[in-house]
Every structure is written in C-alpha cells, then in structure tokens.
Amino acid sequence: MKFRVAGTLGYEVLKPTTFILNIHALRTPAQAVLEETFTVDPYYKIEEIAPQHGESRFIRLEVPEPCTVNIAYSAVIDTSFKQTPTANLIKVPIAEMDASVLPYLFPSRYCQSDKLFRFANNKFGYIDNAFERLLALTNWIHDNVEYLSGSTNSQTSAYDTVAELAGVCRDFAHLGIALCRALDIPARYFTGYAYQLNPPDFHACFEAYIGSEWIIFDATKLVPLNGLVKIATGRDAADAAIASIFGEVNFMGISASCELADDNFQPVFYEGQKIEGLTYL
Amino acid sequence: MKFRVAGTLGYEVLKPTTFILNIHALRTPAQAVLEETFTVDPYYKIEEIAPQHGESRFIRLEVPEPCTVNIAYSAVIDTSFKQTPTANLIKVPIAEMDASVLPYLFPSRYCQSDKLFRFANNKFGYIDNAFERLLALTNWIHDNVEYLSGSTNSQTSAYDTVAELAGVCRDFAHLGIALCRALDIPARYFTGYAYQLNPPDFHACFEAYIGSEWIIFDATKLVPLNGLVKIATGRDAADAAIASIFGEVNFMGISASCELADDNFQPVFYEGQKIEGLTYL
Amino acid sequence: MKFRVAGTLGYEVLKPTTFILNIHALRTPAQAVLEETFTVDPYYKIEEIAPQHGESRFIRLEVPEPCTVNIAYSAVIDTSFKQTPTANLIKVPIAEMDASVLPYLFPSRYCQSDKLFRFANNKFGYIDNAFERLLALTNWIHDNVEYLSGSTNSQTSAYDTVAELAGVCRDFAHLGIALCRALDIPARYFTGYAYQLNPPDFHACFEAYIGSEWIIFDATKLVPLNGLVKIATGRDAADAAIASIFGEVNFMGISASCELADDNFQPVFYEGQKIEGLTYL
Amino acid sequence: MKFRVAGTLGYEVLKPTTFILNIHALRTPAQAVLEETFTVDPYYKIEEIAPQHGESRFIRLEVPEPCTVNIAYSAVIDTSFKQTPTANLIKVPIAEMDASVLPYLFPSRYCQSDKLFRFANNKFGYIDNAFERLLALTNWIHDNVEYLSGSTNSQTSAYDTVAELAGVCRDFAHLGIALCRALDIPARYFTGYAYQLNPPDFHACFEAYIGSEWIIFDATKLVPLNGLVKIATGRDAADAAIASIFGEVNFMGISASCELADDNFQPVFYEGQKIEGLTYL
C-alpha cells in the first residue's frame, strides 16, 4: 500500500545545537521508500546514522549558530505486512527467544514493568492465548484510559498512566508495553505516520512479540492498523523520540500527515469475525 | 592483572522457571578468560546468548521442575586497561559520537536523566574539563549519598537517590549515570567482580564516554579502579541484572569473590598528583 | 461490648529521644475506658496531649539518655456503635458539610486523591447510593490488592498501591481513603485494636462520611467491624502513627492484642441480607 | 501597615458546582480587616466557614446551574507583626511543643519530609541556631531552585522539586516546609496577598515554628516580608488552595493585587546587619 507522508519541525535555535531527528520512514524488507526529500532551511550539515540494529534512521543535524530552522521531510512509501492467524500467536517461551528480543522484556524509562507485575497478571494472566491476552489488554487501556491532549508531558510514564488514566498515544503505548513485559511478553515502542489519524500528527503504538512475530497493537484504536508507516521502533519513547535536542531552542511547531497514494485501502482493525495479527517486517 | 573470581546463586524453584544469568566474566580484547567453570546442580540445559553488541554473556537456564538449584561460576581472568591523560578526556560533541554511543545518552528505567537536567547542570555544568566534571560528580555522590545496605530495593532509581541520599553500589552507579546523561555525557552501567570489596559481593559502578573512551568511575570509592573484572555493561541494572527470573522461585543465597592471582597489584584510585582515566576495553 | 486490649513497644534508645506514642484507646461518648494501665520501664516523664479535636490521645515520652525502654499499655474498653440503614447513607453534598469535615476531602501524604480522580470515578462513579459505592470500592480493594506482609514500607502511598496491588492494612486503608476523596466523599484513617485479628497486631482501616455519619470500612475484611477499639483517627498514617520518634533508636519489638471481655459477640461484616452501616461515635 | 488588596476569579460553570474559596484576608489579633467587599456575579448563596482553628476563612459558594461566574474580593487590611531577635529563635524541643503545633511536624501531601530526612540533615543539620538554619535553608532553595512559571503543576511536590529544581512560589514553600519538618521543625504553608510582587498574583511562602513563634520565610525572596497579607495557613497547598472545586468548570481567569494604603513602608528582608525574625500573629 502506498502512502505519501510528510513531517515538519520548526525551532528557534538560541545556541549551537545538535538535533537527533527521527522522522524518516524506516527502510525495511517490507517498507520501501520510493521517493524521499529532506530539507533543512537554512541548510546545515546533516548525517544519517543508524543506531540499534536498524530500528531507526536518525538524522543528526548541527546548527552552529542562532537562527530559525525549518525541517521538512516528505516521502512516498510502499508498505506491506504479514498476517498471522490468531491460533499461531502463542506466547513464546523465554527459553526460545532470540537474544535480540530479550532487551524488550526488561523495564525501561517509561515502561516500569517491574512495578506492574501484579496488575498485569491479575487482570490478564488468566487468558491463555497470547493474542487474546493482548486484545484484552489493549481493550482495557482503550476503555479505561481517557485520550486527553495536554494531560501528560514528556516525563509521564506507564506507572503514572495506570493510576491517572489519561494520556495521549505515547502514554497508551507505554502502558501497553509495560503490561506486556510484566507478563513476560517482549514489547517495543512503534512510532510512525498514521493514515486517517485525526487531527493529523505523528503517532505511537506498540509491537508485542508473540508467535515469534512482532505483532502491532494500538490501544488508542484511532487508526487502521494497516495504515501505519514505520519511523522507528525502540524500548520506549526515550529511544524513539521525534527529536532529541542537545543545545537550547524554542519549539516553534510540528506537523505530520499521511495520505493514501494508492487505491483500494481496506482498513484493518482487530475486530469482527476473522482476526489475524498484523506484522510490519 | 590476573584475578580468580567466583560467584554462586541458590534458588528454590517452585514452578518451571527460566533464568537469564549474568555472572560470567566478559571476553574482550582486554579481558581474557584463562579458565572458567560453570556448574548447575542439579544439571539442566544451559545456553550462552549474547544480546546487545557483546556487552554481556547471558546464560539462559531452564529449570523445568521444582527443585533446589545451585549455580556456581569460577574463573581466572586476565585483565588489562588503558590509561588516558586527563587533559585528553574532554567532552565529545554529540555531533561526533558514534551511533552505538547514542543510546547511552537517553534516560532509562533507573536513570531518569530527563528529570535531573537542572540538578546536574547547576552543580557540575560549570566545570570545563569532562574528566574533572566526572570527578566532581562522583565526589559529590560519595560525599552526599550514604552507603547503607538494605536502604533501597530493586525499584529504587536515581530520582529517588538524589532526594533520599542513601543506597548501595547499584544506586550510586545509577545516580552517576543519570547525572552524566543530564550533562549530555553518555554513561553506562558496569557490573563485575571487584578485588578488595569488603564484604565480598558483586559490584556495580559506571563508565562515562569522554575523550572518546569509556572511562570507569565508582562513586562508592570502595575498591581500586584497576581491580574490576567486567561481567557486563548496559544502560542500567535493567540490562545487566545478575539474574533475571521468569517463573517462581525463593531466593536462597548469593556470593561473589575476587582474589588476586598475580603479584604486584598497585591499587589505582582517582586521587593524588597525576591522575589518568582508566578504560577497560 | 467489652474488650481487653494490650500493646507493647520496645526500643533501644541511642540518644536523647522524644516519643509521641499513639496506643491509648480513645475516650469518646461511645467508647468508655473502664480500666487502663500504662508503664514505661525504666520510668521517664510522660504527658498526655490531645491534638486535633480529640481524635487521638498522644502520649509524649522523653527519654533523656541511652537505655532500653519498654512501653506497655493495657486496658478494658467498653465500646458501642450505631447502625444506620443503607438507604440513609447517601452522599452528603459539599454544600452541607460541617467545616470540621472538609479537611478530610483534601489529599494528604499517603492519600493522593488528586491523582486518582479518573480511577475512582471510572470504577465507582456510576453507583448512586454512597454506601453501595463504598462497598464496591472496598470489595475492589479486597479483590485486587494482595495482603502481603513486608511488601510495603512507611513511604508507600495510595498512588503506589493502586499500581502495585500489594500491601498491608495501612495500605488498604490509604487506598480506600484516597478513592473516597477522589469521589468527593470525606474519609479518614482509623487505627485501633482489632478483635480476632490473626496474627494479632495493631490494625488500620478507614471511615467514610456518608449520610452525615462516619461509617467504618475495612477493605482487608480480616476482622469483624464491631470488634474494633479506636486508638485514633486522622487524615492518614502521618497523623496517626503508633509511634513518632524524634531522636535515635533501634526498634526492638511491637505487639498488640484484643480479647473479648464480654459474652455474646456477634460478628458484624457488611454481608448478607440486611446490611447497616456501622459508626463508632 | 495598611494595604488595599483585591482578588478575582472567573469560571465557566458547566454543571452544578460547589466552590470552597480561600481569598479572604484572615482576621487575627494582628490583622484587622478595615473594609471588605465580596461579590459573586451572578449572585448565588455564599457562606463563610472556618475550618481548622481559625487558620482560614473559607467561603462556600454553590452555583446550581451552568453559567459564567465572576468572583471578586477587595479589602483594606491593617497588618502588624512582631519581631524577635535571632538569638531567641532557637529550636523548640518536641517535648515543649503545644499539641496544636505537632501536626506541622508530620509529612503532608506536598511536603514528604519523611523522604528528605538525610537531605535536610546533611545540608543544614550542622547549623546550631534555628533561625540561621532556616536562613541557610531558604538561601539554598533560592539559589538552587529556578523560579519558572509553568514548570510545575498542581501535583508537583517537594520530593519533585528537590530533584527537578524548578517551580513557582508554591513549590518553593513546599520544599521549605518539607525540609523544616525533616529537621523536626514544625512548618506550615502561608498563602496571601503580597505587596510589590511582580507580576501581581496570589503568593505563597511558609512559617517555621522556632523560638516558640511562627516566623515567616520566603525562599522566593520576591517580596518584602512585611508586605504580606495573610489569607490562610495550613499544612500545605492541599489545606489552603485558593479555590477547591467540586463540580465541573472551565477556568477563565485569576488576578490578585496588593497596594499600599499607608505611608512610610520600609521593606524588611532577612539581610543586612541586624536581622530579626518576623511573625504575623
């Protein structure tokens, strides 16, 4: 499925500042970048760097002097995904997990799974099939956490959200991840462009490792699961921030959009009769 | 320098349990494992797995049935290290850091550097030379945080320690790491065996990336910096726990020791006239 | 109903220390102290002080020198209580509350009701009758929070318990109070002796102000509600600690007991056909 | 000294709402209310209630229907204060404190003194004279915490501020109070109108109980200590919020002002040669 995505960021730079930007669509076997432009106005040196096993395409930008800088990315992306029958999406024994998966079992800055062990197990531990368990978990988040712009900030974590029950897509994702890990299910943060997100913005959701696949889940239920364009995955938003800023700036603005550049989009949600888990490879 | 190290762990296993053990000395260009034995009594299948760029040697152990399991590791290790003059240990610009270093700039479970920005910058931001800054930072931790066994637990984080001012080696390390990252200095957790640690135990300290080297620091000042045998590095204790346990066990006991198997050990601390930063490659 | 209660505390005093002890049974219109002895061995000056509107009988004890001090209280108490039909136990409008009740609406050290507004309202806000709402709330705590000795400490608060779901009577009470206040229902901490508590100990539960009465609730469900002897009420355990210690001591031991000194005890729990709310005046 | 004070609050009331307003100047032996007007537009029933030993003059206002409500208070106040020589402002032994003072020793919602014991004692414990200790403590807060509008919210507590080192007057006060209590010095929150506050706003600072007097301290150092008009004291902002709202409203606006209605104002700060502690009775 082809999408035309775009993202912009604007900053008033007050002192020499290095940005690590994370708004490029990832290149993967299942996600082809057909066209891509990236501009920084005024122009300063940029460099693409790929930390952490190809999970993101960081752009490092140095702005050596005060100025107003406008960053713009646009691309045409061709995504594909794999679907796996629910019955196959069983919990992977720790003993069979690949070493690269293990880090996603451990607690991280915004996903303190170590503190949510009882919560996760009391609520969802009884459900046998891992996919069903994940559905119950995302349903619970959807039904109990209020989507409320401005209710949280960059320090809010899953431990807060489980008590305060309000947040934005990032908080929904962090709570989903923390609950998975508390259930010994590896989970990671997914940030991307999202088709039909309203109002348009960058989006965040998460992937859980079940049936030896990274299956996508989105507790916000705001967008079709097959309308995502992956920017990055990581342990949580600390790994996959849209922009990490080392210097001093005033934030001016941000925008993101994702439009269909193809025909025949059939939205996929995990609902209805025949559900299959969806993987972005 | 040669050391004979040993570690033991004992558990009463109540249900089928998978352990990820992290007590093997790392093999690195500068740390040779001359001899090594690892026993699990009774014997169950083990497997060595190496996640995260060779930063640890995890042993995965499956205990499929209730029993009392005793785990023992012993080894003779030959370590070497590099020393770098203080004057060279300057702060590395973000713009020049290798991609593999960047993750150590971001906040993690126990090192919420995002919340300690003002604290770190107010206290240590004025010091120009990065090594001097790190010395001031470790001195501050040493002088202000009370080493107090049992005062903290596995959920205690740097944010707690900066207010509560008590902890154990793990907490000293987490606070050091968090303060570094808040100063835009990459830092990572170091766990290992430590010569002359009294009482003997597993030890934790941290490495900061300055002058393009990972320089070791130990805010506890309990052991000579050249008496360490590296087990693992990671973002924090979440990555480098001695044992991660998936199942149900009662903890029975733990021990660690590190003895000199060589002559002429000259303890190195960062004190006196001519200080040089110490790196374990 | 008559009870024979006893409590002991032991400390090794290391430096001159002032204790504020809170183990005396309260004297109220509905709770008569028939006999009472209080000993401090060795003897030091004590003084009874009554802060906060007669909600407690603090004993101030000065120990001016290092020693081992043993404190013992025993008493025979005659308690009575009032029962109010459920139908009358409706929510009191803020507009009709007496000024003395208002402080129990506000958040306190261990009861951060301001952070649990959504949680309380989502879960229990739909229930009309205030007593039914309180029953649902205490049932929820009972069913979801694991009673686990040693799982918490003196810094644990309701905000922790709602996520970690383990604790002791104090934590059950704090969570109950916080949820009430988040629902605009005044609630206060109750500490006392408890008949049939097993193992014997000091107990904590809470009172909610509904139907213009302070109705007792105990989410632990460990003891009959009519088997309590009140020591104190307060906003939370900060107001009603068994002992507040200003100085330096080692804790040696604590005990509490409550035995029936009467016939015909008919245990009351909030269960069965005809439930009435129970008030200790 | 005479001041003309004024405060306004505006709300869009969405559902029937009860307000507890706390903007009236307190009447005390040392603070006379010479003139006073209070208007609610449109008019709804109000009632003055005095909880907690005359520490505040709460106004309870019921707005039974959706509307826009404007609240305005203005008054002419004559304040006086007492000054006590530093040498007399010694720490009061717990053993000599009046029962009414004891609650101000205990931790409260925003002042978790129990978690700051080491911090307070390490930093300020060595200073003998209590007033000097308080000066050091308020200087430390002033020098280390950045006054930054919008950096905190209504859930921010002293435990956050000691690590994050930014806040507004309320946060400065909470940290001061928490540190005092951690040093066994009773302390309470003070909210009022403040002469020469720029920009004009409601103000918060704190009182510490030393030398058997409630001495005023203001770690923001934004206003003269003799230019305050007391609205209320309490354990922390939970007791003394400008407005506690039970219902559903949108906040429209707030203002406060304090002008001199007298001659010869000589600003008092704790600085210079001859300092004396200032008490508002």
Image: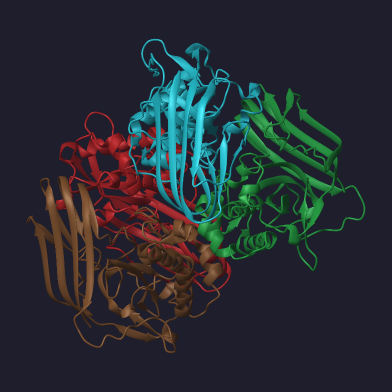
Chain colours: A red, B brown, C cyan, D green
| Horizontal and vertical percent position of residue D207 | 69, 50
Judge from the rendering whether residue C145 lies leftward or rightward of residue D30; answer left or right: left
- Compared to B5, does C244 lie above or below? above
Q: Nearer the viewer, residue A46 or C130?
A: C130
Judge from the rendering whether residue B244 lies leftward or rightward of residue C117; answer left or right: left
| Horizontal and vertical percent position of residue C125 | 48, 25
Q: Nearer the viewer, residue C152 or D7?
A: C152
- Compared to A216, does D68 lie above or below? above
Residue A269: in sight, yes or no? no
| Horizontal and vertical percent position of residue C158 | 45, 39
Q: Residue furthest left?
A: B43
Judge from the rendering whether residue B97 lies leftward or rightward of residue D35; answer left or right: left
The quarter holding residue D70 reads top right
Residue A266: in sight, yes or no? yes
Q: Nearer the viewer, residue D90 or B210?
A: D90
Task: Tell how many labels.
Answer: 0
- Compared to B279, does A180 lie above or below? above
